[in-house]
Amino acid sequence: MKNTVLTFRKAKGREKLVMLTAYDYSTARIMDQTGVNALLVGDSLSSVMLGYENSLAVTLEDMLRHCAAVARAAKSALVVCDMPFMSYHINVEEAVRNGMRLLAEGMAQAVKLEGGVDFYPVTRALTRASVPVMGHLGLTPQSVHVLGGYKVQGKSLVQAQKILDDARAQEDAGAFALVLECVPAPLAVRITRELTIPVIGIGAGPGCDGQVLVWQDMLGITENPAKFVKIFSQVGQAMLTAFTAYADEVRHGVFPSPEYGYSAPDDEAFEKLR
């Protein structure tokens, strides 16, 4: 069964939702086989795939290309694509146009955008234009310079109230789900309990309706991952071991050995070539 926005709505209070980031066809194909509910083509693409310092450098064209690759692999997972920095900040009309492009050209089934009350009109307009929206509050990476770095949000009552108000606004604007990043667990519980839409946590504790992680983080590829990241397998070390072994065998003439090559009916005949 294909996961849809309705799958997310029906899961609220019944089952935990599973989401992972994905940026390419091959990785997304493997993830989809596990039965994850959603694949997020995150603007984290900027840092984990393209090598930029933060998520601000990634473009709409980047997101379109990578989202389409993931969508071609996703047979059951819902494909959600981040709206990158500047794609929904200028005006509502441009935001709607870009959201539509992510569905039409990027083959996404939903978009994700950061912000609360201030982006109420954007979420409202997108949903009215048949573009499903997933909100994102707490630590919002596109606002890294305003926040002064990647820090836990909502630790004070004033901050917590602002995040709760923003969550209410996004739900009211029509968002079908909400990502809550790097907030105290009790605040995440309060927001999850109050909203009728599912809340997906990342660094927000176990009380959310589901979880999302960046796959390079949880497989031990990212250097110095955040505190909230559990490493499920040291794939990074396994890759380093394999690449090192390959380089060593090539340098010493061990690879390729005869079993990895092709022969002809009369190999010696090639010696007669002029």
Image: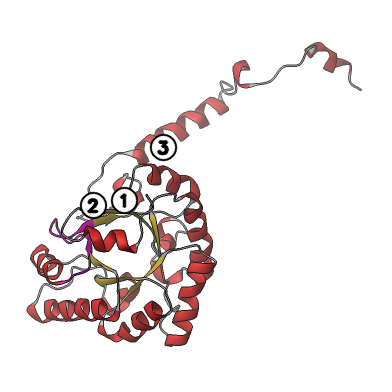
> Splitting the image into 4 quarters, where does residue 126 fall?
bottom left
Residue contact between numbered discs 2 and 1, judged by CB atoms under 8 Å: yes
**121, 150: nearer the viewer:** 121
**254, 8: nearer the viewer:** 8
Q: Amino acid at mark 2?
A: Val
How far apart in space, not on screen, are marks 3 and 2 (Cα)? 20 Å
Tell whether 207 sits left or right of 123. Answer: left
- Circle 2 is placed at which residue position? 229
Query: What color scheme is it?
Result: secondary structure
Q: Is residue 3 above or below residue 191?
A: above
Which of the marked residues, 2 or 1, is nearer the chain's N terminus? 1
Residue 239's x, y, as percent? 41, 37
Q: Residues within 10 Å of mark 2 (few under 14, many from 20)?
A: some
Q: Is residue 52 above or below residue 87?
A: above
Looking at the figure, which quarter contains the C terminus?
Answer: top right
Q: Amino acid at mark 1?
A: Asp
Residue 214's x, y, as percent? 33, 54
- Circle 1 is placed at which residue position? 217
> Splitting the image into 4 quarters, where does residue 128 fall?
bottom left
How far apart in space, not on screen, are marks 3 and 1 (Cα)? 14 Å
Residue contact between numbered discs 3 and 2, judged by CB atoms under 8 Å: no
- Circle 3 is placed at which residue position? 239
Secondary element under disc 1, as helix, strand or loop, is helix
**In this rendering, does residue 187 appear at all?**
yes
Q: Amino acid at mark 3?
A: Met
Tell whether 156 sits left or right of 50. Answer: left
